[in-house]
Amino acid sequence: MATDDTVAVIGAGMAGLAAAVRLAAAGYRVVVLEAQAEPGGKMRRVEVAGHGFDAGPTVLTMKWVFDALFAAAGRSIDQELSLVPSTVIARHYWRGGAALDLHADQQETIRAIADFAGRREAEGYRRFAADSRRTFEVLKDSFIDASRPNPVSLSRRIGLARPGALLAIKPFATLWSALGGYFADARLRQLFGRYATYCGSSPYLSPATLMLVAHVEQEGVWTVQGGIRALAQRLAALAVELGVEFRYGDAVSEIVIDPSRRAVSGVVTRTGRKLDARQIIYNGDVAALPRLIGVPPPDPVRAQAQRSLSALVSCSLAEPSGVPIAHHTVFFSDDYEREFEAIFKRREAPSDPTVYLCAQDRDAAGRLSAGHAGTERIYALMNLPADGDRRRFHESEVSTCLKTMEHRLELNGLTLSMNPTAADITTPDRFATLYPGTGGALYGMASHGWMASFARPGSEGPVPGLYLAGGSVHPGPGLPMAALSGKLAAERLMADRPLTRRSLPAAITGGMSTERVNAGASPSR
């Protein structure tokens, strides 16, 4: 039974799971409240004709974040999960089938770029990779893995005596303009400009600091055997072993604020269940927070303009033919700038979208698993504006988007023979339902402008006792960033309320199932 020293975690996405594990490992009583029937949040899984698909993130990067998370609970991620390093990070195609692979081996990438675009462009990549690494090293401890800074505090953390380091991160340049200093070939600017979409933004408006993604990928990209969903399930099971209680299928409808203390005092769920808690970690999009704490929402026009990308995601069984695909393959549009103008300025679906495919039955280099024949699991994505709370995608609009995707694939050399009845389609309006308050935005607010990195809220919420975590807060979207936000929220909570109890919950090794523990702990399910 929960007591007033219970910590409530709202949401069992990556940040909520990370916070729960951190707190429970330190000895705190934790109850996680999740609206869905299982953990994972955006690490969602869908089923098509009996086949399971990862329908959110598909790879793991910044492995050091997860090493630390499992180590905090006395475990090793390498023992808990089977991780497979990717030799090919991604394959890229342009009109006519021109292709370029990025490799885990940087020298292989340099050779591939030289063959694709010439020695001068390969040398540009060498300089780009070095500057990407430098940017990451400058920002890793001073920004990424630190409480939310402002420009002054970030400068202090980097060191005012190191002006070269501050200038090296190109704080006032856009990613697209910075890429022009490395690459004359527009296709390479397009390829590396795509890193802006990793945080749901336009390369023409995002800061050049996003080049650090190149180094993040060079440090390693892993697939998880069993899919990314296996990571969520393992973290949830580990949390249960540490004593965390999960309550699924009952969304939180209110965060209760004690008027006498002007601080949080608990939560109320959709079914009317109450949980007393003087410390709450909110792992949801901050756009939905005003409704929960009873304050007016922000101006809807401004909020919409600040949103990151949404998408149309298709998970289907298909037979690809034509150009060979890898586990991750990108098919670029002819006019990248026009594509982002359609999404962010005209708020419409681009007529010529870039299409991302994840072939989930293939390894990094594109080899199918032994004995696999016939159709395979194909995840396809095109970017769209996050207007899912203002308009619904009707069948005709979905059909138009699918046709434009198919046309782009064919122009770049790929044909997908698919059964239209064997597909799961998610559009911005559906994402808006899945993630309340977002309008379907998948990455919080867009990272547009040099101040965007400082605009995301930190771990301290607007009410005492309320802490924030997830992809819409610092340090930003993506699995490792969300995990770091959960860590930062847990650490802020622990600093505000040091634990007086000395006994820690014992981790159960070897055997009790998540389902059994949860069923006993959570009668509301």
Image (cartoon, helix red, strand yellow):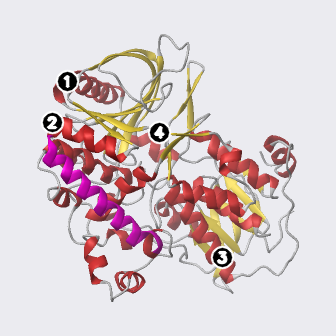
Foreground mark, 3 or 1, reads 1
Residue 212 seen in the current view: yes
Magenta-drawn stretch contains 140: yes
Q: Mark 2 packing: few (<14 Cα in 10 Å), some, or many (20+)?
A: some
Q: Amino acid at mark 4?
A: Ser
Residue denoted by label 2: 334
Measure how far apart labels 3 and 4 are at the Cα level: 36 Å
Q: Which residue is mark 1?
A: 411
Name the disc covering residue 493, or none.
Answer: 3
Q: Is residue 417 above or below residue 362?
A: above
Q: Report the amino acid beneath label 1.
A: Leu
Mark 2 vs mark 4, foreground winner is: 4
In this view, the residue in front, 133 or 283, is 133
Callout 3: few (<14), some (14-19), or many (20+) C-alpha neighbours within 10 Å?
many
Q: Secondary structure at mark 2?
A: loop
**What residue did someone put label 4 on?**
86
Q: Which residues are magenta?
A: 118-141
Left or right: where 349 falls relative to 233: left
Q: Position of residue 444 (x, y in %)?
A: 42, 58
Q: CA distance from mark 1 to mark 4?
A: 27 Å
- Whether the residues at callouts 3 and 1 have beta carbons within 8 Å, the answer is no
Give the mark nearer the N terminus: 3 vs 1: 1
The residue tagged with tag 3: helix, strand or loop?
A: helix
Using the image, determine if residue 324 lies above or below residue 128. Answer: above
Does the CB distance between marks 2 and 4 fall below 8 Å? no
Which residue sits at x=56%, y=18%? 49
- What amino acid is found at the position of numbered circle 2 in the picture? Asp
Residue drawn at (29%, 78%) of the image:
166
Q: Residue furthest left?
A: 184
Mark pair 3, 1: CA separation: 53 Å
Q: Assign the magenta stretch its main secondary structure.
A: helix
Q: Are marks 1 and 4 in contact (CB under 8 Å)?
A: no
